[in-house]
Every structure is written in structure tokens, then in C-alpha cells.
Amino acid sequence: MASFNRGMGSLLIAAAAATAGWAIWDAAFVVHEPRDPPAARGDWETASLGDCPLMAQALNVDRAGKAPEVLPLMGADSRAGPCDWSRWGLRLGRVTEAEFQAAAKAAHGVGYIPHLSLGRPRYSRLRLRAEVSVGRLYGWEAGSGEICRFQRDFTGWRLQQCRASWIS
């Protein structure tokens, strides 16, 4: 009976250690926010000033040696939002959702304003990892989106990769 209790104690300690290890890994590395396509979640206007550098890096990603595209950024209204994009070398126009809908209505559903859709950063619980969604929409059925992943180090945020998340 004593060896059974000793074995159960060791098993409980191992289970507790595994649970603690998983919780630490989950808090440090897993970004838990939903990964909706940015076309459905252009919530960059709700970001804080501290989020602006990550969003600017995601918009400035070098795509096969091409300069970043000059598309207007979709927003709920025409206010500037939290970021001064020129600080990061971006010259972004704006298109509001109302302007977008008016253009579509005026052209009987065929009018389309090409634009960027941007999601605010989503962070891991310990804020060691982040993801930013960017969408480039060119027409009703022409666009692509990607999720850019960042890792925090001693010098700040570093881009890890950008991967396609949707294409239409």
C-alpha cells in the first residue's frame, strides 16, 4: 500500500508539473484572439498608440522587392485614428465604410473602392507574441489577407513571418 501511495504521489506531481508547464507555454506563446479575416474585422481604430508600430510594420512588409501598395485604409469614419502613419513612412489615404457603400450603390453594386483592411494586434497573455491581420482588397472577388506574427525581444518587436490567411 505504501508503494501505491508513493506512486500516486509521483503521478500527481508529474501531472501538476505538466499542467504548470502548459500554462506557462500557453501564456507566453499562444495568441488567443480569433483569427477572423481582416475584411471582416478592420478594427485598427480601436488600437492604442502602443499598437501602432506593429501595425505599421505589418503594412510595410517587403513583398518581393515591391514598395508597399498605396491603397486607402478602410475605417468606420474619417478621423485619423490612433496612429500617425507618416512616422513610419506610410502615406495612407482613408476611405470610410459610408463612402465605400455609397460608391457601390451609385454604380448599382459594381462600384468598388480598392482598400486596405487592418486588424489591431492580438497578443499572447504575457505579451511576448503578437499577430496583426492585413487585407488588400481590389474588387468584390479579388483580394488577399495575411497574418503577420511578431516576437518581442530586448530591442522591441521583431517580425517573424507573414503568412497568407485568405485569398479570393
Image: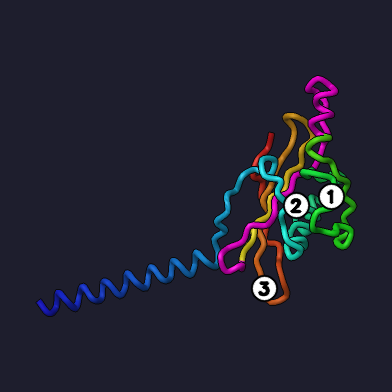
Identity, as a three-letter code, of the amino acid under mark 1 = Arg
Of labels 3 and 1, earlier in sequence is: 1
Of labels 2 and 1, earlier in sequence is: 2
- Give the labeled residue for mark 1: 79
Left or right side of 11 for 55: right
Residue at the location (75% across, 32% down)? 142
Q: Is residue 42 above or below residue 49?
A: above
Q: Picture quarter containing residue 5?
A: bottom left
Identity, as a three-letter code, of the amino acid under mark 3 = Asp
* Mark 3 vs mark 1: in front: 1
Where does residue 111 sit, x and y in percent of width and height?
Answer: 83, 26
- Give the labeled residue for mark 2: 45
Magenta-tinted stretch: 100-128
- Give the labeled residue for mark 3: 153
Q: Are marks 2 and 1 in contact (CB under 8 Å)?
A: yes
Q: Secondary structure at mark 3?
A: strand
Give the Cα separation between the discs numbered 3 and 1.
33 Å
Give the color scheme: rainbow, by chain, secondary structure or one colour: rainbow
Q: Residue furthest top?
A: 108
* Crowd around label 1: few <14 · some 14–19 · many ≥20 (10 Å): few
* Crowd around label 3: few <14 · some 14–19 · many ≥20 (10 Å): few
Was residue 108 drawn as part of the magenta stretch in this picture? yes
